[in-house]
Image (tube, grey):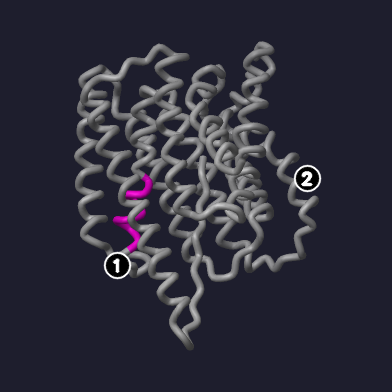
Amino acid sequence: MNRIKLVLIMIIWGSLGVFTRSIPLSALSLAFLRALIALPVLFVVMKMKKSDQLKWSLLKPYLISGALLGFGWLTLFYGFKHTSIASAVMIYNMCPVYVMVAAPLLLKETISKIQIAVIFISFLGLCLIVGDNLAEGYGYMGLALSAISGMLYATIVLINRSIKIRVDNQTATFVQIFTAMIVLLPFILFDGNILSVVDLDARAVTYTILLGVLHTSVAYTLFFSLYTHMKSVEIVSYSYLEPLFGILFSVIFLGETLTLPQIMGGILILGSTYIGEILKDRRFFKNKTTINRSPNIKTSFDVSSSKD
């Protein structure tokens, strides 16, 4: 049942690009409304869990990551609207590579030969996709914004790794998305295009509501609930279904076509990062088992993730 839930979440997140293209609102309006609509549902979930009172000092990392999350959504939605969904999805999913590059510098983590190979192969795939998109007439804007979105998400992952004292997932999610809404609010007020929401037809309104409730509130809540029932390596293995569904939906519903360089680039990026993450997690759990069997050694491990 948990695996079915995880596949369902990947299908929901995979359809994000199609929904974004189907709503005639700016990327800024979509990012803001996504957070605004999601918050009431997340607030109810948080209250149902009866979370304890927290010190503001514990929430600082989540406030920072929430601000980055808002801009991450914004740049990803711009990417969806300014390049092909398939290219945006594949470039955004370079995130694990950005983490591999930054972690040794910022968190003093060691980098393995496998990770070096993953970085090289992924950037080769990125070059194929970028070159093909430019040849097809797409500008740099969509590609660059998709890459920035992946970098912002990678920064969030690094912040999450550095947190020493954690709060529960429901509170963390609510704080992050509330912060995302707050940081986008001044841009919304300055832009003024949010008023165009009144001109949406019934279908676009429904899609916008689903963006906030289904793609955010429901998907986030289900995703974090799985961490108590599934191993990290299982979640990682299934998470790579998200970009595959995203590409599939763009072909089926938007009529996009995949070129040979796109396919090759996608295989290099998604294939190498998938193998790298699986090998890393297996090595992690192997080391954990070895340490736990050793006497007089105490240690703690943390596996955390957040998605679209």
Helix, strand or loop at label 2? It is helix
Residue visible at 20% across and 20% down in the picture: 135
Q: Is residue 263 above or below residue 120?
A: above
Quadrant of residue 61 within the rendered picture: bottom right
* Residue situated in front as seen by the camera: 231 or 308: 231
Q: Where is mark 1, residue-wise?
A: 110
Q: Earlier in the sequence, mark 2 or mark 1?
A: 2
Helix, strand or loop at label 1? It is loop
Circle number at residue 221: none
Q: Whole-percent x and y of residue 164?
A: 54, 70
Horizontal relation, residue 3 to residue 143: left or right: right
Residue visible at 48% across and 88% down in the picture: 296
Horizontal relation, residue 134 to residue 215: left or right: left
Q: Whole-percent x and y of residue 208?
A: 63, 24
Q: Whole-percent x and y of residue 276?
A: 31, 51
Type of amino acid at the residue the image marks with label 1: Thr
Residue visible at 36% across and 22% down in the picture: 84
Q: Which residues are magenta?
A: 95-103
Type of amino acid at the residue the image marks with label 2: Val
- Mark 2 and 1 residues: CB-CB less than 8 Å, in contact? no
Where is the N terminus found, in terms of image quarters? Answer: top right
Circle number at residue 44: 2
Mainly helix, strand or loop, the magenta region? helix
Quadrant of residue 198 within the rendered picture: top right
Q: Whole-percent x and y of residue 207?
A: 62, 21
Residue visible at 67% across and 19% down in the picture: 205
